[in-house]
Image: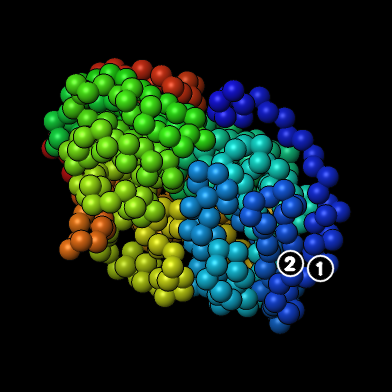
Amino acid sequence: MPEHQRSRRMSVRPLPLLAAAVALVAAGCGSSGSNTSSAPASSAPANTASTAPGGSGGHAIKIGVLTTCGGPFALFEAEAFSGAKYALVKNAGGTAAGTKPQDQVTGATIAGRPVRLSFGCSDATPDKAVAEARRLVESVKVDVLLGPLSGDEGIAVANYAKSQPQVTFINGTSGAQETTLKVKAPNFFRFGGDGAQWMAGLGSYAYNQLHWRTAAILGEDYSYPYTQAAGFSAEFCGLGGQIVKRVWAPLTTTDWSSYVTQLPRDVDGVLFLTGGTNTVNALKAFTQLGQQIKGHALGGSSVLDPTAFSVGSQMAGLVGGSPVPLGGTTPDWTSYVNGFQKTYPKVPGDSLFTVLYYNGMSAIIDALNQTKASLSGNEQAFRSALTKLAPTFPNGTVKLDANRNSIQPAYVVQVVDNGGKLGFKVIRKVDQVTQDFGGAFSASSASPGRDAPACKRGPVPSWAKAGAS
């Protein structure tokens, strides 16, 4: 059964983890003076937690961070954890105690209270994500949970959040539209938008600049790629383009050649909606069939991660949609990237996974500072502060809508060859992208799926019209 179907029917089952978690805390496998906790032995890899020794008054603020450490998106573990940790270094006085993904941050304080950071590892499946969220919330007893990373995970964790009103959940990078447009958990906040918002400007780029009139889509078979396809088609199809075929592969696919061969050869181009090792394998299979990427392939947001550069120089020229200004030159962006690289030199700072986890942790820090770290009364003061935030992140200023989903900029980005080294440059910025995508989506719309929304001509968002900039 596909993961996107299973996630909607799953039941959240309690796991017998408390005794194991307590035993691991007592074992104290971290640095001297810190409390540590780990996931059960079945997790891969094992999770850790770090405590920032405070020296200041007040109980520690417990923050859990959940991302993928296994499966096809294991490549993003270092990016997500390091992004969250860098926010504590930059904005809460912390010190990085190492550069590995689950190394500690020490000395961080928020409103005079020390911070205890606990890590949770999933594998991009909703069952595992909820199991780890449950462990962090019910066994470790975190006050705030940051994550998860992937689309179906976000839908499942947002539903789980409804059963835990005492804890506040801040999305990591999970980009399924349904998470905030339909689930609407009152204690779940998303400061990074959904996958459709991240594609603003790309469908119209294909139609107006590349002059595509027909396209095919190849992606992973779950909610996030469906959401990205919805954003692309709202522009491309609305302007008159046709999506001839959509090919969806299981998330666990390793050999992408059979799926690439299903793509029609007589279309103007292909939109790739993959991530991690799947992107590398899919694009390599595409080029091995003699296909050219530049001008004939576009990418979803996860395709534009630096981890995909192992595809090789053929990737130069690929254009995609992104929530962050990869290759940007604004002072906020360059200051963030340079500072991050000094702290975590082996992790790409110019990754949506790094930036959005940094943003989520930064929002947590800002709201806690505003409320003097008050977490009483089911954290209502903290949530009220989160709702009113309008932070300027490295990727721009955002604010939340009534569903606690961000209104934010999106970027059309190109992979470029800088003297034999691949990098990025921003082609276009689209400001103030809402989750309704200029009126294309609403809570009553069918959730994006394998064939939904249908490709049809009609009204397009203002930014997609010819001549819009």
Colouring scheme applied when the structure was drawn: rainbow
List the residue tagged with mark 1: 27
Specify the quadrant that holds the N terminus: top right
Tell me if residue 383 can be seen: no
Depth order, front residue of 149/277? 277
The x, y position of residue 275, in whole percent, is 42, 43
Contact, CB < 8 Å: mark 2 with mark 1?
yes
Q: In this view, does 90 lie to the left or right of 67?
A: left
The x, y position of residue 109, in whole percent, is 63, 74
Q: Is residue 297 left or right of residue 23?
A: left
Q: Earlier in the sequence, mark 2 or mark 1?
A: 1
Q: In this view, does 74 lie to the left or right of 383?
A: left
Q: Which amino acid does label 1 sit on?
A: Ala
- Kindly state the secondary structure of the residue where label 2 is placed: loop
Residue 36: numbered disc: 2
- Kindly state the secondary structure of the residue where label 1 is placed: helix
Q: Which residue is drawn at 49% across and 30% down?
A: 250
Please tell me in which quadrant of the rendered image residue 202 appears.
Answer: top left
